[in-house]
Amino acid sequence: MIDTVTTYDVVVAGGGPAGAATALRLARAGHTVALLERSRFDRPRVGETLAPSIQPLLRDLGIWEQFVALGPLPSWGTRSIWSSTEPAAHSHLENGYASGWHVDRRLFDRMLLDAAADAGACVSLGTSLVGSRYDALWQLTCSGGRRLTGRVLIDATGRSATIGRSLGARRIAFDRLVGITAQWNGVDVAAEQYLLIESVPDGWWYTAPLPGNAMVGMFMTDADICRHHNLTAPNPWRTHLASTTATALRLDTALRLDTALRLGTALRLGTALRGDTATHLGPTTRSTTSDGVRLPTTPRVYSAASHRLVRPGDTRPWLTVGDAALAVDPISGSGVPRALRTAEAAATTAARLLTHPADPAPLTTYESTRNAECTTYLSTRADYYAVALPHPTPFWTRRRTLTPA
Ligand SMILES: Cc1cc2nc3c(=O)[nH]c(=O)nc-3n(C[C@H](O)[C@H](O)[C@H](O)COP(=O)(O)OP(=O)(O)OC[C@H]3O[C@@H](n4cnc5c(N)ncnc54)[C@H](O)[C@@H]3O)c2cc1C
């Protein structure tokens, strides 16, 4: 329970993977930590496919057994229609850890937060940090009006980076990517333990199995294209889905939708279906088909825009971690491992600020390392998109110029 009398060594705003892992490390090192999380983990979370590199990071945090107890699905690799119309396969057997993982992100994030609490962090769920002022100490205001004080403040609020921005840091956005997603339950995923990526003229599709016999499908495009095609409405979203080749075929097979997704020959030949598909599929909130497979509910949209948050010349003891510091395109598959990796650097920097509050070097080093990561990321992203099929559409041509959005 957060104590409003104590002055915490570190206050972390945001209990996603970055905030929880930072709080865990600092609490284990003996610092007093308050961790504020806006949600109560009562809503779905996206980002369900974890790269094999997650394993050493979780072992290093001492929570590998807790992770295995969640019952994650091994992910054997990636199949993609990206640089060729012929599917390409990449097996995780080629790396040292044999598999990646498909997880329920709500459970995964909660597991990390519980580990931080077990380590001694004072966790407050359903609590947003809404105000901050620095005057030798951080004077902080939470939702509901509760106040607390801290020596070091960490913004782990994810892509919104609300705290850093409110403190005057500048967000450099590199694109306007969004993910529009739906989930099907009651799917037999035994033969589906891989990630499928497919490029299409307006963006790319991502499908993956989830623990508990579910499958997630996500369309990644730019916010303006999403608006133009009204893709948050179920029927346009599904019409786009039906225009894919491998993705629609995968879902058609996996979902066994013998009534609603009887797309038959058209899909198998990879033919784009006409607008009347949506009518054919029927309303989204209907429905269990004759074999008991549910259709997805209304698609949800998430910002997936890349950015870097910069704070030149600000020597106050605060820092950003995870997506708040540097948010990357999900095509890189590196979001969660990156969040856990930067948590280690953030915890080290915060600890150094506690012992040497007047020394600007730790912050400078931390920020320049994030800048270097950002440069590497942008170059890797350019490589990914450069080898993609040459669709002559705005989504793809924008990514060949790659200037800030
Ligand atoms: C569509 C999409 C698909 C993705 N797919 C993958 C994938 O397959 N694999 C992968 O590794 N990564 C993926 N990612 C990226 C991955 O989800 C993120 O990189 C990762 O979640 C970053 O962790 P974080 O802790 O920095 O931020 P977040 O996970 O966003 O956590 C931020 C937390 O801060 C809380 N918060 C926000 N504001 C406040 C406030 N004022 N006070 C208190 N709490 C606050 C939020 O409730 C949230 O819990 C995907 C991202 C998107 C958008």
Image: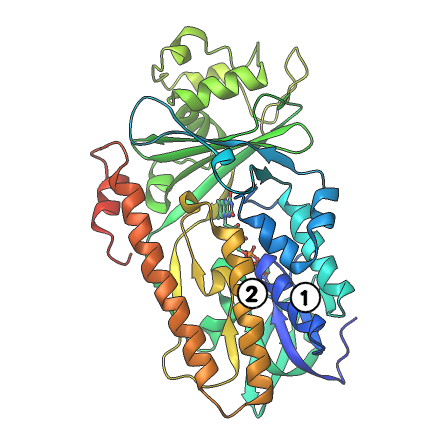
Between 64 and 232, which is closer to the camera in this rendering?
64
Label annotation for residue 24: 1
**Circle 2: element type:** helix
Is 186 above or below relative to 267?
below
Q: How is the image coloured?
A: rainbow
Does 194 sit left or right of 68 as displayed? left
Label annotation for residue 343: 2
Q: Is residue 220 visible?
A: yes
On-image quarter of the C terminus = bottom left
On-image quarter of the N terminus = bottom right
Between 195 and 123, which is closer to the camera in this rendering?
195
Is 205 above or below relative to 137?
above
Label annotation for residue 331: none
Does 83 sit left or right of 226 as displayed? left
**Circle 1: element type:** helix
Does 275 sit left or right of 234 as displayed? left
Q: Residue at x 28, y 48 (%)?
A: 382
Q: Amino acid at mark 1?
A: Leu
What is the number of callouts on the image? 2
Residue 375: image quadrant is bottom left
Q: Are marks 2 and 1 in contact (CB under 8 Å)?
A: yes
The image shows residue 179 at horizontal and vertical percentages of 45, 42
The image shows residue 182 at horizontal and vertical percentages of 54, 34
Q: Residue at x 76, y 85 (%)?
A: 5
The image shows residue 67 at horizontal and vertical percentages of 69, 47
